[in-house]
Amino acid sequence: MVTWCWVRDSLGWPKIPTSIISFQEICVAVDDRCNNSLMWWIVAAVGWELWKSRNGLVFSNIIVIKPPKQVAYKAYGFLKQWIKLSKTEDRNKMEATLLKMEERLSTWWPVCSEDP
């Protein structure tokens, strides 16, 4: 949940997604800034890193839980790598979004509340 607060605060989302339905509500709420491929790109990277962290804990008996900021940096790394795989016409928007997330990550302290 805390990692999603970083995304919310970086991109000005009204709330953090707690399900696919709430994610779709966020997409509608940010309508003019909503780019479906861009939004799914973010959800995929954050979700993937959260899933990997969870699997490490469950299947590899990793007792040390990653701090939220480490999870956020790993998700950021996925986003940065995945830009290279995107369509050329989407790259500028993705790079601008990634820059907002990077700026917020450098000053972000992993504390989260439901309200921004």
Image: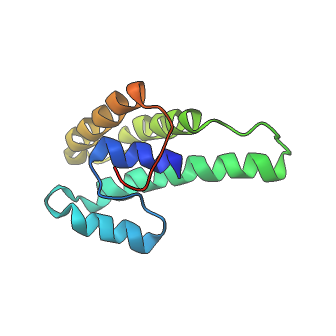
Q: State which quadrant residue 37 falls in.
A: bottom left
Q: Residue placed farthest to the left in the image?
A: 32
Where is residue 98 shown, x and y percent of the image? 32, 37
* Furthest residue in direction bottom, as rendered: 21
Does residue 68 sit above or below 16 in this rendering? above
Looking at the picture, how far across and down is residue 48, in whole percent? 56, 51
Q: Residue at x 31, y 64 (%)?
A: 26
Determine whether, in the image, residue 73 is placed left or right of residue 6.
right
Seen in the picture, residue 34 relative to 100 is either above or below; the reply is: below
At 28% from the left and 64% from the top, the residue drawn is: 27
Residue reaching furthest right? 61
Give the quarter of the image for residue 91.
top left
The structure residue drawn at horizontal position 53% and vertical position 53%, both measured from the top left corner, is: 1
Q: Residue furthest top?
A: 106
**x, y percentage for residue 51?**
63, 53
**Image: 53 above or below 29:** above
Q: Position of residue 32 (x, y in %)?
A: 13, 60
Q: Nearer the viewer, residue 93 or 26?
A: 26
